Each structure stands twice: as C-alpha cells, then as structure tokens.
Image (tube, helix red, strand yellow):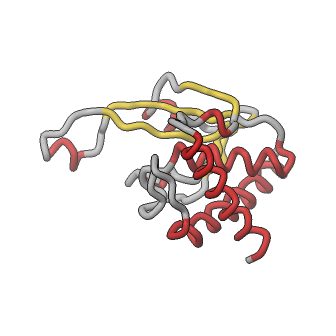
C-alpha cells in the first residue's frame, strides 16, 4: 500500500496544482475557487475522487464532517458555531488536498492512515461513494458547472 500511497500523493498533488493554476477560470455557483482551498473542500473532494477513480484507484468515498469551531480568533469575536470539512477515503486512508485551509495544518496534500485530526475535529462524518451525484446539486446548471470545472482541471493536467 505504501507505493500506492506515494502514487496517490503524486496524483493528488498534480490535481491540486491544476486547480491552483486554473481556479480563476472555474465558475461554480455553489462554491468559489478564488480563495482555494478555503470553502471548496466538498467540490474539490468530489472532483479529485472522480479523477482518482478514472486513474484506476477503484472506489473512493467522499467523507463530510461537521465540528464545533475551535479557532481562537472566532472566540474573541464572540462567534460560536460549526464548521464543515470534506475529504476522501480509500481503504482507510485519508486523502485531503484542502485541509490546509485550517491554520493548524501546513501540508497542502495529505495521504495518511492516521484519522485523528479529521475524526476528532469532525466527529461522526458521513461517507458516500464518490460521484457527481454526491454533490447537493440544485439543478442541471449546477451539474453542468461541475462537469465544466472538471474538464478545465483535467485539460490542464493533460496539456500543461
């Protein structure tokens, strides 16, 4: 599995680079990539999952969790509430290319078996098989926008 983890890390890193390089061209009404990785973990996880599946990694799961805000800056402002995060899992391995939107994570690409950070911060997450239908798409326009975003990212990967 270590070789597979290294390969997944490489492919996930390339996918993240493609998003960073094309984010100004991606327009999805539900989410903005302008501040990537902030606020784009759900869509990013689905798109990365579809890409990895197409590369032959087999079934992946999109995992969505919700946790109480623990950021001190929010507490100082008197704000309390919840935050959400999404990532991928395959064979008990976490694949996350947006965790660095949180101040305590420095790595831009995470491929690890250790679930401590994810499951303690976002307990009792929901797991769904990766597909475009994993998104809460409101209508055909949202579906089209997601497909277009995927094409922009993948085209960059193949023709960079």
The furthest residue to the right: 56
Left or right of residue 91, residue 135 in this image? left
Q: Position of residue 48 (x, y in %)?
A: 67, 50
The furthest residue to the top: 124
**Quadrant where the N terminus is found in the figure:** top right
Left or right of residue 101, residue 11 in this image? right
Q: Residue at x 65, y 34 (%)?
A: 133
Q: In this orientation, which residue lies closer to the viewer: 21 or 69?
A: 21
**Quadrant where the C terminus is found in the figure:** bottom right
Left or right of residue 89, residue 108 in this image? left
Q: Residue at x 55, y 59 (%)?
A: 108
Q: Residue at x 83, y 44 (%)?
A: 57
93 relative to 33, above or below:
above
Q: Position of residue 36 (x, y in %)?
A: 47, 60
- Counting the numbered discs, the total is 0
Left or right of residue 69, residue 39 in this image? right
Q: Position of residue 6 (x, y in %)?
A: 77, 55
The furthest residue to the front: 140
Q: Residue at x 21, y 45 (%)?
A: 74
Q: In this orientation, which residue lies closer to the viewer: 105 or 55?
A: 55
């Amino acid at each position: 599995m270590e070789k597979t983890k290294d390969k997944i890390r490489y492919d996930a890193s390339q996918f993240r680079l493609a998003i960073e390089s094309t984010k100004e061209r991606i327009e999805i009404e539900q989410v903005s990539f302008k501040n990537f990785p902030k606020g784009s973990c759900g869509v990013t996880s689905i798109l990365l999952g579809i890409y990895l599946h197409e590369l032959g990694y087999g079934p992946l799961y999109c995992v969505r969790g919700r946790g109480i805000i623990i950021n001190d800056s929010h507490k100082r402002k008197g704000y309390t509430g919840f935050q959400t995060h999404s990532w991928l899992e395959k064979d008990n391995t976490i694949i996350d290319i947006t965790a660095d939107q949180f101040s305590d994570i420095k790595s831009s690409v995470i491929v690890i078996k250790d679930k401590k950070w994810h499951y303690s911060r976002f307990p009792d997450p929901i797991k769904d098989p990766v597909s475009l239908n994993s998104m809460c798409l409101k209508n055909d326009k949202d579906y089209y926008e997601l497909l277009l975003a995927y094409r922009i990212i993948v085209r960059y990967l193949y023709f960079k």
